[in-house]
Image: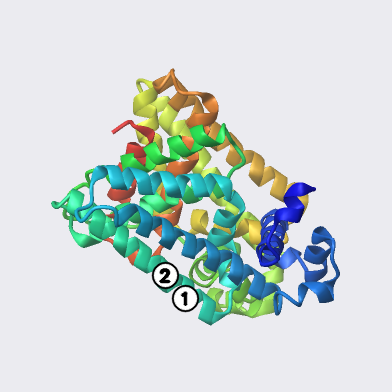
Amino acid sequence: MQQSRSRRPGDRKSQLAAIAAELFRARGYRGVGINDIAAAAGITGPALYRHFADKQAILAYVLLSRVRDMEAETTAALTVLEKPSGEQVDQLLSRIASASVERREVAALWRWEGKHLAPGDQKEIGKRSSAILTAWAKVLMEIRPELAAADAELLCWAALSVFGSVSVHHTTVAKRRFARLLTDLAKRVLSADLPAVTSAAPAAPALGVGTRSRREQVLAAATDLFRRRGFHDVSIEDIGAAAGIAGPSVYRHFPSKASLIHAIARRAADRLAVATEEVLRGSSDEREALRRLVSSYVQVLTGSGELAVSFSIDAVNVAEPERAELVRVQRDYVTRWVDLLCTVEPGLDRREARITVHAALTIANDLARTRRVSARPNLAAELATLLSAVLNIG
């Protein structure tokens, strides 16, 4: 009670935003209404409108506050000395790591719900985020002068993904230990030596005879459209047109858009499962298996749009049995990585190994979808290098 009395009146807006952030993370932005937020805060809907114009304004407040916090943390860490030092970078990484552990729900919202912001807020967050990354990249080039600006930016994006990875899982350890682990993983990324660009091998000729079935054509069209425009901005008519059929004809093959994205996610999971079995059969030890697993994951991620599309499954109204099945398959896949990493690093706590694996996979998933870096000609090799650095198997 004493803590409640001591709060400043101005904190009320932040308190309401924090409550909303937890609800957005648990149910998704679309699954939360103003009345839900008000009820969780113990007030009425009209009372909530005294602080925020609408639900979108609450999301903007949460995300812009986090960006401003990162700006402050960056400034505080990098203006102590005239010339940046490794110690300052450590301080910056520790600040960001601690904030990520403390506010996991904000990291989740930043990753998945930012698309619901008004265009002006999206632009503002994008501008501020880019400025932060530019500041980080400049510091990294001071410490590693051999880096080109684009390469430094890539490494900084990857480090940011390490911190954002806390939003994709629920594994935890003591907060101070958690933050230290994230800091160490980010330092591995920033210290990584990116592979040199090599001449691309000529594309192998397409094999096979005949044409794909209509169902496969619909699935391929939906995959491409969902990857480029997002699930909610694609209609059944769009999918039909891309597949060369009338929109309603799509329903002969799939009963709904949700069933389409479930089929895409299931196909991606099957590709990963097959690749994993091939890796384990063909490896001489666990370290080699883990390295080959990295390569296979990057190949599946960059070779087709299915895996990238499957990341949006959480924003789709997929039936609970199908959703539970996909979650189980994903957890089983991550567990294979964790088992190998624990064998390679026997002194590593299993929970820390799971956090490490999620950080590695998140780097690949994020960078493959980040426009500023996804077109890099050597991205697949760079992703494999970054994942290997995080896993400490380079």
Mark 2 lies on residue: 128
> Which amino acid, by three-letter code, is at mark 2?
Arg
Task: Check residue 124 in the rendering and tell me which mark sits there, or answer none.
Answer: 1
**Figure coloring:** rainbow
Q: Is residue 131 left or right of residue 280?
A: left
Image spot of residue 125 (x, y percent)? 47, 71
Q: Is residue 357 left or right of residue 148?
A: right
Instruction: Quadrant for residue 240, please give it.
Output: bottom right
Mark pair 1, 2: CA separation: 6 Å
Instruction: Determine the residue located farthest toward the top in the rendered image.
Output: 346
Above or below for 356 versus 56: above
Image spot of residue 191 (x, y percent)? 26, 42
> Which amino acid, by three-letter code, is at mark 1?
Glu
Query: Badge 2 local density, few (<14 within 10 Å), some, or many (20+)?
Result: some
Residue 142 visible (yes or no): yes
Which of the two residues, 24 or 249, is positioned nearer the viewer here?
A: 24
Query: Badge 1 local density, few (<14 within 10 Å), some, or many (20+)?
Result: some
Image spot of residue 261 (x, y percent)? 62, 60
Image spot of residue 102 (x, y percent)? 57, 46
| Total tally of numbered discs in the picture | 2
